[in-house]
Image (cartoon, rainbow, N blue to C red):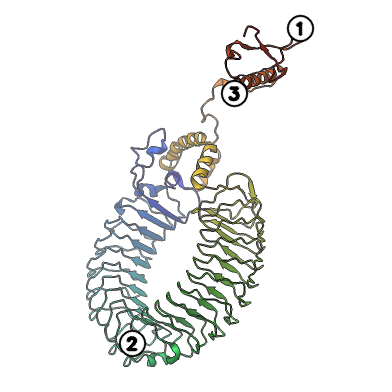
Amino acid sequence: MKQTARNYVTFRISKLHITAPYPTEDSWSKQGNPRNYQQGRSWSSFLRYAPRTLQTLVLNDNEPLQEVVKWPADLRSLTLGRSFDQPLQGGLPGTLQSLTLGDSFNQSLRGLSWPSSLQSLTLGNLYNQDLEGVSFPQTLTTLTFGDQFNRKLDAVCFPAGLKTLTFGRDFNRSLERAAFPDGLESMTFGRNFNHALPVILPSSLRSLKLGLEFNHSLDGVKIPRHLQSLTLGDGFKQSLACVLLQSSLQSLALGYHLPANLEKVLRMKSLQSLSFGVGFNQSLRNISLPDNLQTLVFGRTFNQTLRGVKLPPLKTLIFGHDFNQNMEGTSLPADLQSLTFGCLFNQSLENLKWPGGLKSLTLGKTFNRSLKKVCFPCGLQSLTFGAKFNQSLEKVMLPLGLQSLTFGHCFNQSLEAVRLPQNLLTLTFGASFQCSLEEVDLPESLKTLTLGESFNQSLSGVAVPPSLQALICTGGFFWVDGCVALPRSLTTVSCHGITVSTEGSNDSPTVPGLWRKRNEGRQGVKKKLPLQTLQCLIEYLNPQLEVLCVEKEVTDQQEVLRFLKATTLVGILPVPHPIVIRTYQASPYTAMWFTSYMWGVIFTRSQRMPLYDWKKIRLVKDSANQCRAMPCPVLGECGMLINPSS
């Protein structure tokens, strides 16, 4: 990517990720040796050739921004990577809307001239500078601090339009004198924050998330009347009895300890989402859940039966890591749409009464039970199996309306006798799947097919659905011999992280056959590629494009494309040796000579010395004007004559 981009990227690129090192003018030889091309050039010089359409740019180096002569005109998002730690004064492009500074950045922001349209600013983990005197742009709406930021906020002037404010892990300063803008809608504190909240929070606050160590009373805090989401950390042990929670609260996430007088909170009619903490493991028979609750999430340690529990009309139910209770006799809400089981769940589903409106079912990591007698709801649209599931689906009745089917890591069962739903849109196999798909009846509606890391079967005999749009191979699956005809609807082919988009092409794409192993396949294709021709072409084009883009200052991609289209191999490739140019023309005499020579080699190598002396054997011509060759006891009359003296 660096080699291609350095010369001149002529495509309509909207996102580019650049890593060091870069070539320098001194190290770039006149012959255009590609090996010397990736040595030490700064990305500041590289950006002179970047296309105007570039909108997102990631730079992983530590070079001054002041050296950048020209930024892309349409650049909107800039990320300065992990090693960047240079002052920002006078170096930022004016078109930026989002700026992300890497982990090493720890420079002062005072006196900085910000881009006029900047909306999002993210500071890296090592940033820990005083913000007094820093003038943030008034257009800023999102501000995120890294893990090590821990400075006072007393004299900080936040922009009036700020909507989202996030603090990192180490922030633990008093907020008594901090002046937050009234329009702030979201505040998130990190792990170590454990100071009392200000009595008056921003009136527009809608989301408040407290960290792991926070354990201060909320009694005297005036909760904003528009607050919709409140998250308490695992260390919170205070009572909520005297806390005036507004009727607008819709989402509540509890920590490890249940707060005292929880019943008061659960009686709130506006509460729609409730998440229990890691330590919650109590029976729900004595807990009255809110009537309007739609989402219920259990923590890691919850492992209580739900028999006899009347659940509210939930739409989403998520169990934690340890849940492993038999679901037989459990009354699930009729309106339930999404059901997720945790890692340790491995119970039979045969007698489970499914809700009629269930659309999504996710089974945990250890689930590995037979599904032959399971009657799934007809309206189920998404079915996801965990890592250890490896049961046959031969006699399983999958829902007719199923649209997404995902198998886990260990699944490696044949689907030849399985009737897949005709409305299936997405089919995903795990890392261990190696079964052939030749006899599998893939639904015609299938749009996305994902094959796992171990898949090594050919697709030459597979009936690929005509509506397939994406074919993804996450492992060592490649194509080299044969030819697989793919439908015209296919827009994306991804193999081992390399994605090729065919969108916009009117031709039916054809993909060469299977490459079974990564290393062996790569070496096989490498031998077939005309590498010498490609190298000659690159060595010729590099200096030509250098002159075109630098000296002639050509920035229009259409001109570069016209130059490339006009380039031919005439005069570029080395002249072959004259003997290579000559072609072999067969004749009866040469054919007879080669035949005699071949049988002679076979004859001599099949004898045991000292019956014959190899040096005394000669080839003669068998014609009517000469004596016939002596019959060979092994080869017969084949044109061989053995000297009687031997």
Label 3: state its secondary structure. helix
The kind of residue tagged 2 is Pro
Disc number for residue 259: 2
- Front one among 564 and 247: 247
How far across and down, in percent of the image, does residue 548 sit?
A: 45, 40
Q: Which residue is found at the position 27% from the left and 79% from the top?
A: 179
- Residue 643 in view, yes or no: yes
**Is the residue marked by circle 1 packed among few (<14), some (14-19), or many (20+) residues within 10 Å?**
few
Marks 3 and 2 sit apart, C-alpha to C-alpha, by: 89 Å
- Residue 288 in view, yes or no: no
Picture quarter containing residue 634? top right
Label 2: state its secondary structure. loop
**Is the residue marked by circle 3 packed among few (<14), some (14-19), or many (20+) residues within 10 Å?**
few
Marks 3 and 1 sit apart, C-alpha to C-alpha, by: 38 Å
How far across and down, in percent of the image, does residue 401 sit?
A: 64, 73
Question: Which is more N-terminal, label 2 or label 3?
Answer: 2
The kind of residue tagged 1 is Asn
Q: Which residue is mark 3?
A: 581
Left of 72 or right of it: where is 570? right
Q: Which residue is mark 1?
A: 625
Marks 1 and 2 sit apart, C-alpha to C-alpha, by: 117 Å
Number of dots carrying numbers:
3
Picture quarter containing residue 213? bottom left
Picture quarter containing residue 298? bottom left
